[in-house]
Image (cartoon, helix red, strand yellow):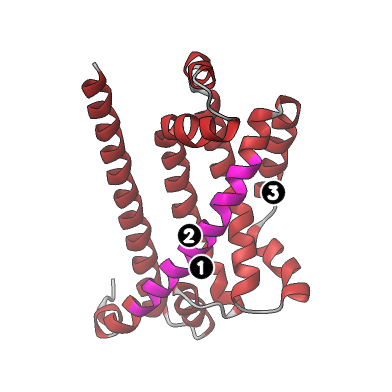
């Protein structure tokens, strides 16, 4: 493995990695509120739940490169079509986990919250979502790692990030450049996964401590 290019261009690769992470986090920040609204609608209005899950599942079956090519005529090149693509593909993981987390909350707990006079939105914000948070965080982790991988396609439409390094290496037949991009993208995905797993663990510990204090 020729790692000379990787170490000789470490500053550039680090800058592209940070840009790649920024693109991915921007997509997640857009996708998460959308998924929350869709999921809450699906949980509150049960007849709509399965059609919504089928819809987000169907989106994920569309080849990502084909979807990006479809978006180019209307959205042009650059960041916009890339973000639309990433937000769409994140929904399957976010919506499924949010719905699973919300439906897994004990109905008796929700009924008790309503019994003390909480409005539906207070129940959602103060009881339902906090209890479902570990499952939701697992969905966020999977979605973000998936987004980081898919964001490589942004290099095809000059959106920035590590995709530009990979596509540049492919177009110029530069294997060392492609290898450097692959190492960077895998490292970024692994670090992101580990970071969110740590947050999940801390969240679980905090919930366990609060439960112990109540006892």
Q: How many marks?
A: 3
Count neighbours of disc 3 (C-alpha within 10 A) and say few if under 14, some if 14 to 19, many if 20 or more.
some
Image coords of residue 184 (percent x, y): 35, 68
Q: Residue at x 46, y 62 (%)?
A: 25
Q: Secondary structure at mark 2?
A: helix
Residue at screen point 57% across, 50% down: 33
Most frequent secondary structure within the magenta stretch: helix
Question: Gap between marks 2 and 3, in whole Å?
Answer: 17 Å
| Residue contact between numbered discs 2 and 1, judged by CB atoms under 8 Å | yes
At 35% from the left and 74% from the top, the residue drawn is 180
- The residue under the point 60% across, 53% down is 89
- Identify which residue, 159 or 206, lies in the foreground: 206
Quadrant in which the C terminus appears? top left
Residue 182, horizontal then vertical, whole percent = 39, 67
Q: Is residue 168 above or below residue 113?
A: below
Label 3 and label 1: CA atoms lie apart by 19 Å
- Along the horizontal axis of the image, is 169 left or right of 199? right
- The residue singled out by tag 2 in the image is 149
Q: Write down the residue under mark 1.
A: 152
User: Label 3's element?
Assistant: helix
**Front of the two marks 3 and 1:** 3
Q: Which residue is tagged 3? A: 59
Looking at marks 2 and 3 on the same chain, the residue that comes earlier in the sequence is marked by 3
Furthest-top residue in this view: 108
Magenta span: 15-38
In the rendered image, residue 212, in percent from the top left (x then y), is placed at: 22, 21
Which quarter of the figure is the N terminus placed in?
bottom left
Q: Is residue 203 magenta?
A: no
Tell me how far mark 2 sits from mark 1, CA to CA: 6 Å
């Amino acid at each position: 493995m020729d790692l000379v290019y990787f170490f000789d261009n470490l500053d550039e690769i680090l800058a592209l990695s940070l840009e790649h992470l920024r693109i991915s986090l921007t997509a997640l920040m857009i996708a998460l509120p959308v998924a929350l609204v869709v999921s809450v609608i699906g949980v509150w209005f049960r007849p709509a739940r399965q059609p919504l899950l089928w819809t987000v599942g169907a989106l994920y079956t569309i080849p990502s490169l084909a979807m990006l090519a479809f978006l180019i005529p209307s959205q042009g090149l650059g960041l916009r079509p890339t973000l639309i693509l990433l937000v769409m593909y994140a929904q399957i993981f976010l919506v499924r986990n949010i719905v699973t987390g919300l439906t897994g909350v004990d109905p008796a707990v929700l009924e008790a919250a309503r019994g003390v006079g909480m409005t539906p939105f207070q129940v959602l914000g103060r009881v339902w979502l906090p209890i479902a948070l570990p499952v939701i965080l697992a969905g966020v982790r999977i979605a973000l790692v998936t987004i980081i991988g898919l964001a490589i396609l942004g290099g095809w439409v000059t959106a920035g990030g590590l995709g530009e390094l990979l596509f540049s290496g492919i177009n110029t037949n530069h294997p060392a450049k492609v290898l450097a991009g692959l190492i960077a993208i895998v490292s970024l995905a692994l670090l992101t996964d580990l970071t969110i797993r740590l947050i999940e663990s801390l969240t679980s510990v905090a919930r366990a401590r609060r439960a112990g204090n109540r006892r």
